[in-house]
Image: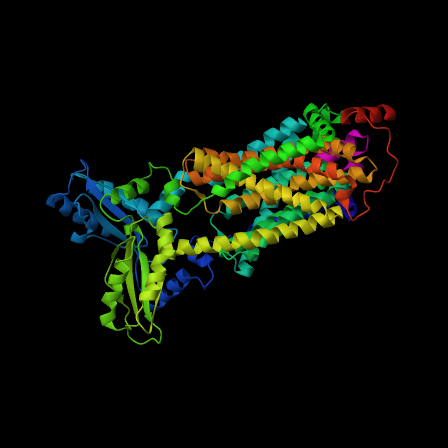
Amino acid sequence: MFRRVGRFAVHRPWLTIAGWIIAAVALAMLAPGLKSTTDETEFLPSHYESVQVGKLQEKAFPKTEQPAAIAVFQRTDGGKLTEADRRDVAKVAEGLDGKHREKIAKVVTNPQSVSPNGQIALANVIADTKNVNDEKLPDSVKQLREDTKELLKGTQLKAGFTGQAAQSLDARESSGDTDAMIMMATFVLIIVLLLVIFRSPLIAILPVVIIAVVSMVATGLIGTAAELGGLKADSSITAILIVVLFGVGTDYILFLLFRYREHLRAGQEPKEALVDAVAKVGETIASAAGAVIVAFLALLLSTMGMMRAMGPSLAISVGVTLVAALTLVPAVFSLLGRAAFWPSKAWRKQPKNRFANSIGNLVARRPAVIAVLSTAVLAVLAVGTLSFKAEFDTSSQMPQKLESVQAMTDLQRGFSAGQSGPAMVYLKSKDGSPLDKGALEPFRAKLAGIEGVGSAAPAVVSPDGAVAQYSVVLKYTPSAEKAIELAGGPLRDKAHAAAPGGTEALVGGTSAVLADIEDAVGHDYRLVFPVAGLAIMVILGLLLRSLVAPLYLMAAVALGFCATLGSTVWLFQDYKGENGLLFMLPVIVYLFVVAIGTDYNILMVARLREEVRRGVPAREAVRTAVAQSTPTISAAAIILAGTFGVLMLAENSMLQQMGFAVAFGILLTAFVMAMLLVPTVTSLLGHKAWWPGHQDAPREVPAAPVADTASQWTHGEQVRR
């Protein structure tokens, strides 16, 4: 099948290229754009309590305004606020309220907004939308910051804004244009590395152009699927798509080009060499893509809508990349022929590849030693996984110099840290009848008496009297671990138990939402990962016609996953002293290290299988496969790892963690797992690795063993001459 596909693309290049260009232009013009949402409650199923709270609030308090940010005032000398200072605070709040910024309903303060120690005063910025994640709110807060500077002139005060909208603004601005940074880094890495490898400007630039066309098609298809299927893409999907498209796309193009060059060196004509390259690596590329696609589609089993939306989007992008690798890439290089390598003539002769040959010889001669050492390295790194601690407090991982972080620190000098995002407790009548007003205050008192609760405001009753709303301020910042544990545990348990007869209590708010997300993420880890692993094993079994090889390949992948996560724990938690790692980090490692990194294992094992089927003895097959595959795997891994490594330059600790984990994980997968562990285990198992299939039966009597890959090529070249 792959030979037929390759023959069509190679012998009808203009038709193939025209089809891709028409599809790219049509989808770019006609396909709807990607939708996005940052409201985490939209990503949780309806059975979670925080989601039920959102629906109850919308029904019982349809006009309820939401706090968006908090202005924190203090004297410039750090002393107690005077009566004149308090009047200035009220005047500034009134001035901000008069600005009528978009999505801002009002800016209010009152005498009770002064801290007990008299050092801090607050003004609440209230949004006129129930969606506190509205994309326009951070922009309005940015304008209020500038307004405040003008209004504070002539006073003894200074102010800073914190709260959800202010933190969103600072997070966005501190991370900079991440998409552009990733795109530029990817372009530079791909172009420079391909230029070094092939010494041809055409080959250095063409993959970027090809993947750009693929990106247009993939994005258009994702937008169309999202429109027709009602999917919503998370705000980070664009950056992830860039990495997937360029990372996976470069991998597949390199798989094909290296084999194409190998056939040219063997004396084949360009078109024949391209068709043979597609025929030889087509199954490998398809299997690698299939493994990545099923891994992404496994996210459909996720509890969180964010993951369910991301899965199909990434799967579509990989599917489009696969089709392009088998059609568009051969068509383009069919038109160029040998001119693609201009001006270099290095493609005509076999390079010495001392590193690749050394690795191949070492793996073949000392398989047991290399297998034990590589396993030990991964196992030692994996120990750090036992200390993994999920961190939901995103503000703690932001640069401390940011205004929202400093303002939160100032707020905590006078008030409970939870003032910026109180938990919302609702008491509702089960039969819809009015609540007993005499029971409302005792219930509030019980809430206020819970350990970790700073205060509980008096009940606000709905117009029909069937629902009461309590604003409960915790002693911890809303996204801190203690706040999440309190809202999802003792606060909920005691609120449920304290509800008067005939009523039901529900707990919502930021901390409660994060508690539900934490529960959902734990569920996903227990379900999605095993299902994805099983699906990848099935694909490996079909590719290799073996039941044994997929078992140790997936065991190696699992060990690589743990080693990656453990290394990140040791660096950021133990060495840098951070409270924990981004709670989504295991999913990110799964997406890019396990799913995409499996490509390298597949490439290596597929080459091993190819050599074995030629009748080459097991260890000789391992040596040849490693020597031939190492340049391809090295180049692909360095490009992908480098793309993510750029994120380590960001000031945001979350981006640093993501960048290190994926970059280091890809390098581990390529240089330890694919080049060392997998081939040595295969060598030690010998024919058992391919059980129960018989595809390893010799098809031809092998020639006398040769010393190394370079001498093997030289012998063939002399024969042709």
Above or below, 254 against 422 in this view is above
Q: Quadrant of residue 324?
A: top right
Of all residues, the one furthest to the left in this rendering is: 83
Main SS, magenta region, reads: helix
Q: In the displayed structure, does residue 367 sit left or right of residue 99?
A: right
Residue drawn at x 43%, y 55% is: 40
Above or below, 185 against 388 in this view is above
The percent coordinates of residue 484 (x first, y second) are 38, 52
Q: Would you say residue 159 sits in the magenta stretch? A: no
Q: In the displayed structure, does residue 27 sit left or right of residue 568?
A: right
The percent coordinates of residue 107 (x first, y second) are 24, 52
Q: Quadrant of residue 409?
A: top left
Count the marks.
0
Nearer the observer, 559 or 627: 559
Nearer the observer, 673 or 467: 673
Q: Quadrant of residue 176?
A: top left
The C terminus: image quadrant: top right
Residue interval drawn in magenta = 258-274
Asked whether the viewer can see residue 560, the reply is yes
The percent coordinates of residue 714 (x first, y second) are 81, 24
Q: How is the image coloured?
A: rainbow
Nearer the observer, 513 or 63: 513
Asked whether the viewer can see residue 32, the reply is no
The percent coordinates of residue 10 (x first, y second) are 76, 42
Q: In the displayed structure, does residue 120 sit left or right of residue 64?
A: left
Residue drawn at x 34%, y 49% is: 165
Q: Would you say residue 268 sits in the magenta stretch? A: yes
